[in-house]
Amino acid sequence: MFTRPFINNSMFICFVLYATNEELSSTQTGRHKCSETVFSPSSSFFQEGGVTETLRTLPDLPAALRFLLLTFGPRAMVERKMSPVLKWALVLFALASVILNIALIVVHSGRTPRCSAQRVRPLLAKHDERSVVFADLSQEEYLQVQTYMLQQKGLEISTKQTTKPSENFLFLVDLFLPKKVDVLAFLDGKGPAPERQATVVVFHGSTGFIKEYVVGPLPNPTHHRDVTQEKYHMELPITKRLVTVGEYALMFEFFEREVFSKLKKVMQESFGVGPNRKLNAFEQMPRGVRSGDRQTWVSFFRDMSGMYIHPVGFEVLLNHQSLNASRWTVERLLYNGLYFDSVEELNQAYEEGRVDKIVYKESPDYGSLKPKPGLQQQVGPQQFSAEGKRFSVRNNHVVYLDWSFAFGLSALTGMRAFDVRFRGERIIYELSVQEAMSVYGSVTPGMIVTKFLDSSIGIGRFAHELVRGVDCPYDATYVDSVRYIDTPKPVRFRNSICVFEHNMGQPLRRHFADFFHHSYGGMANSALVFRTITAIGNYDYMWDFIFYQSGSVEAKVHATGYISSSYMVRGSLKHGHQVAENVLGNIHTHFINFKVDLDVSGVKNVFQTKDMEFVNVSLPWIPDHFAMIPQLVEKQLKTEQEAALRYDTKTPRYLHIASNATNSWGHQRSYRLQVFSFAGDHLPESQPEERSMSWARYKVAITKHKDQEQTSSSLYSQNDMWAPAVDFSRYIEDNENIENEDLVAWVTTGFLHIPHSEDIPNTVTVGNGGGVLLRPHNYFNQDPSIHSVDAVYLDPGAEESCENNRMACFAQETCGPVLEPFTYQGFDGVMKFGEWS
């Protein structure tokens, strides 16, 4: 399709008319007089070779026409003679050129203009450079900390990814958050900036312990100190460490050497293992049944798309407690539901026909996410900003209409926001993800005791690049993050955070006055979304913090990805549903913990509950007639144990963090915690592993803020669930006073997942999630969104006026989006199981 006129109309018509002996006039040639063109007889056009050279160099001349004119044109131009066929061919071509150019002009004049990338109106909120106090470490800071730690000769630290378990490995570098009182003094202009420091985790295989250090100041660190005892009140034995990439590499080598090579016939006949086909391992956790254990059941799956839903019926219990990999052993094996004490015992039973043999056959690729052929459809709707984006991201700070906040992405706990303000007033000091936990049911050992605690693997660690137009709107603002966890150097994850304004699809508020005072008032619900997505093994969690124009903030999660599955044996259907041939989708729970440090009109707050009850009331005008009437019930809770609201008990419907300050109507200013959850039952407290996830006992728990109680879980909980480094229930045991104190709400949400056939190939986000909504309750004197430019008001007779209704003139103001080109480099950040180059 032509996008511009393919030849200058005036010149071409002049050429045709001149060559065909037609009268040249301005009326026939349009804008130019032919006598003033290159086709004048006195022009150099008619000099020797001039015609041919001009025709050769005319821009945008179609090849066929150029050939025709070069063949017959020069002579005709000079001699003013032309054959009838060529004459009419040129006339028709000239007419076609004019018609086509007119059509192109009409088409282009009707096209929607491109939107300006610049904002039409300035932003209300301003960026605050002091947000750097919460900023994740930069690539340079990570390298400075790494260099400093390597220079400490007494520590003898290695950064190689293949560092042996018996050696000292620099596992993690992350931001060390300063004390809240110091940060508030700095943010409020009452104190200096706190010293910038880093947390460093070292696995000291040489001594058998894990140590945490605080290193500072940044940049250019000069000192460090061991904070392990101060933080956890215990030593951390090396068995509490998670499995590093280096240890995984040793495990893979072990299975190849001690299992697969000794079971070649079983592997080939039952699972199709050969030179071009292998099995993939997926480990289950915790690694044992008591503190100090390091024995892991490893299940094996086909090496194909969605491996997690392709179990083969083979599992191995590996004892890797020793720091010397040569001392690792196979403790047990499971083949098609039968247990064996050794590789040799399984081999013998297989050869003697004492097992029900699994016979390999090709499996359909039902786990693939490639689109299947279907009806051709249009691209779905896209959103764009007609007048430029109404938010801005600078460094680690976001401003949006009345909102502003700082943000970070912890490698361990994931997404977090700090110093959240509405119209300049701080509402939230910290809003952060804390933990994601799942408990599975099964009859096979790989999943029978499985309890995943994802922060022990690293929730933020697996925040890879987001796909434009799918994970986030195409026109979102994308932000990189840098992390140092189980790698030899810091790694940048491109576009791993996105920020966008989104029309939520329903009005924020509206009313149509039908009875009296006819009018319509409403407002589109546009909100800002701050998002990252973490792919932790089989599951993908989508984390959203949403900022509404009504002054509400929502923290929520949606789960997708692949279900965990097991090979079906006798009794399997007690623990889930069959979802493919020989594949059981295992029942499991999802519990998510958020930290909500609200500061409502300052740090001195109280915790209140509100609910209703029916009371029997005598009607004033009929005293002997009674009616059941709803009545407000209010209560203020005084201690941490009172305010630890368990999931297995009825809790009041309204939960508030309130200030003693009041609004214009005399009510205490407060924010309400509204929890959305479809959680399953929590693990009974009689189970020894429950202490590592004791936060999940509570729908909401309120504690007095302490800098030492920074998180509800820890990096070490997964691999020693029986003696956890952080036991959240201890935060409540001291039962401190919570009246007029700095309060923190720990909120647990989640859902029960009973897998079903529609989870193949992938679990969808619809209905699989939960969250907490923080809503102003008597905090303002009225809904603050009444001042929003998005509000619309209509009076009878003024329906088309733009005065209070931007939508009335929207059709005249619209423009088309200016889009960034689609790129994706997310595979650059995948785990590498070898030495880095």
Image (tube, rainbow, N blue to C red):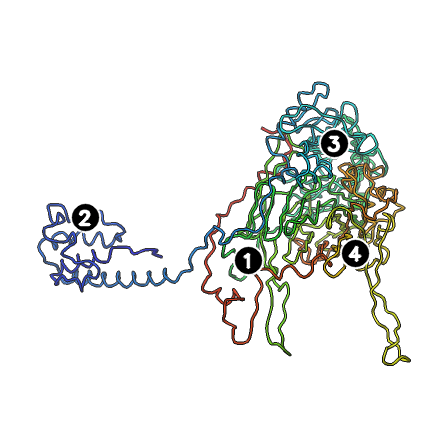
Q: Which mark is residue 655?
A: 4
Q: Which residue is mark 2?
A: 54
Q: Which mark is residue 664?
A: none
Q: Which residue is mark 1?
A: 373
Where does residue 104 sit, x and y in percent of width and height? 33, 60
Q: Secondary structure at mark 2?
A: helix
Q: Is residue 346 visible?
A: no
- The kind of residue on which mark 2 rests is Thr
- The kind of residue on which mark 3 rests is Glu
Please state the total of marks drawn on the protein image.
4
Q: Which residue is mark 3?
A: 258
Dot in front, 1 or 3? 1
| Relative to 614, 69 lies left or right | left
**Labels 4 and 1 touching (C-beta < 8 A):** no
| Mark positioned earlier in the residue sequence (3 or 2) | 2
Q: Residues within 10 Å of mark 1 (few under 14, many from 20)?
A: few
Dot in front, 4 or 2? 4
